[in-house]
Image (tube, rainbow, N blue to C red):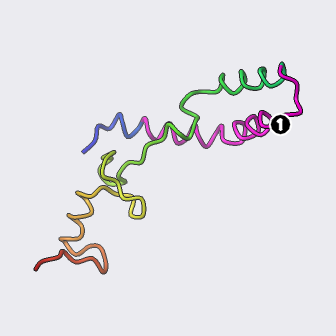
Amino acid sequence: MAKKSMVERELKRQRLVAKYAARRAALKDQLKDTELPLGDRVRLSMKLAKLPRNSSPTRLHNRCQLTGRPKAYYRKLKMSRIKLRDLASNGQIPGMVKSSW
């Protein structure tokens, strides 16, 4: 089980990304405009830099929905390999059977 503080920190980042997404996208669109003078583009980049760091989507990290584990994460199932194996062994995932040969 991951530390509760790390899971909460990740949730806080997700909320910040959602809150600033429109503002960040608008600033980036304006920055792409090559018609603007250099001074205006520098001011826009400074505005973008003043946004909170955790509002950037690249700072998000996928975590298991059940345990909070950050590594060995399956995107389709939104869980880690360990929890996936436990649930499959218990027969709680339809169509998934533990292999044996």
Disc 1 crowd rating (10 Å Cα; few below 14, some 14-19, many 20+) is few
The answer to whether residue 55 is magenta is no
Q: Is residue 23 above or below residue 52?
A: below
Compared across the picture, whether 98 is left or right of 24 comes to: left
Instruction: Give the main secondary structure of the magenta stretch.
Output: helix
The quadrant of the picture occupied by the N terminus is top left
Q: Residue furthest left?
A: 101
Question: Bounds of the magenta span?
Answer: 9-38
Residue at 19% over, 71% down: 90
Compared across the picture, whether 101 is left or right of 73 comes to: left
How far across and how far down the image is residue 86, in percent? Answer: 20, 64
Foreground residue among 8 and 45: 45
Foreground residue among 11 and 54: 54
Element assignment for label 1: loop
Q: Is residue 85 above or below residue 30?
A: below
Residue picked out by circle 1: 33
- Looking at the rendering, which quadrant does residue 89 occupy? bottom left
Q: Is residue 73 above or below residue 44?
A: below
The answer to whether residue 19 is magenta is yes
Compared across the picture, whether 34 is left or right of 62 comes to: right
Foreground residue among 68 and 73: 73
